[in-house]
Image (spheres, grey):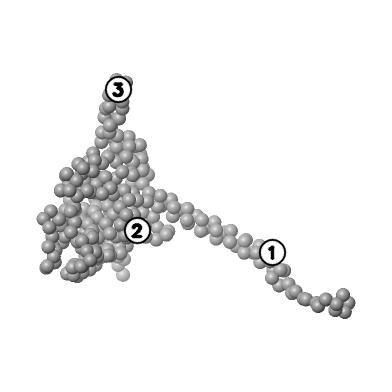
Amino acid sequence: MHRVSSAAKFSAAIIAGYGFAQLKSNRVLADGGALHPPQYPWSHRYPWSSYDHASIRRGYEVYSQVCSTCHSLDRIAYRNLVDVCFTEEEAKALAAERDFPDGPDASGEMFERPGKLTDYMPPPYPNEEAARAANNGAYPPDLSLMVKARHDGTNYIMALLNGYQDPPAGFTVREGLSYNPYFVGSAIAMPQPLTNDKLEFDDGTRGTISQMSKDVATFLAWTAEPEHDDRKKTFVKAIIITSIIAIPALFYKKTKWSLIKTRVLSFVQPGASGH
């Protein structure tokens, strides 16, 4: 029998989820709600599993080339990428591609310098007003904690990026908005950001919509919880150590308390013979 690859399983899950969305989108939700996203087979979903770091790297490429034009990533510095999806040299090179304000210098003037590992990802707009002016009044939210800010966040992002479609009969979408059943109200100000083969990944992976959305969702899951892998490693170590300690602890408990647990107490009334 031929083994089914994890990529094939993931693609099947995406197709099933999209089919589910097509069926459910024919019903307009009167309360302005949204469809619950399908559950995708993420590599980090189990207590003993870690992030797919190759996917994190591709997800950074999607963010930097697509999402960063509108969305900020305020909580992530270039140093956070080291040994996660880039080497130290690669992260330094990425930071050096951008100029950051610094100063004052010896003459009291501010200046710009190439980025360093300690610099945080630069925002696309200088302030909220500029962001709204460039997006017809809509404010693109920061993505650092988006996975935590939305219910079932990783699945939500995956479903949202794959959920753009034509509105069903009877549903009117205002000009400037797009129909997406996974967004609250089903009308979203963000136009469809991903198209097939929009990017060429460094590792040769084909940039389909499902692949790019899966990778950027994994990347944003990591930005929301960079300590995820270390926490799980600590958990596994704690389980192993606790299991080792449990054997002598149970033996000690058995020998220490065996006499007390098996003793018999006899009560004699006061004034009884011989006392």
Residue at 19% from the left image edge and 56% from the top image edge: 188
Give the residue type that dot 2 points to. Ser
Q: Nearer the viewer, mark 3 or mark 1?
A: 3
Mark toward the start of the polypeptide (3 vs 2): 2
The answer for how far apart the CA atoms under marks 3 and 1 are is 75 Å
How crowded pointer 3 is (Cα within 10 Å; few <14, some 14-19, many 20+) is rated as few
Residue at 36% from the left image edge and 57% from the top image edge: 44
The answer for how far apart the CA atoms under marks 3 and 2 are is 51 Å
Residue at 24% from the left image edge and 63% from the top image edge: 34
The percent coordinates of residue 207 (x first, y second) are 21, 53
Q: Is residue 202 visible?
A: no
Q: Residue tagged by mark 1? A: 256
Residue at 69% from the left image edge and 70% from the top image edge: 261
Mark toward the start of the polypeptide (1 vs 2): 2
Q: Nearer the viewer, mark 1 or mark 2?
A: 1
- Asked whether 50 or 101 is in front, the reply is 101
Give the residue type that dot 1 points to. Lys
Q: Residue tagged by mark 2? A: 43
The percent coordinates of residue 170 (x first, y second) are 12, 67
Q: Nearer the viewer, mark 3 or mark 2?
A: 3
Q: Secondary structure at mark 3?
A: loop
Q: Residue furthest bottom?
A: 273
The percent coordinates of residue 266 (x first, y second) are 77, 76
Relative placement, left or right, of 138 versus 90 is left
Give the residue type that dot 3 points to. Gly
Q: Residue tagged by mark 3? A: 108
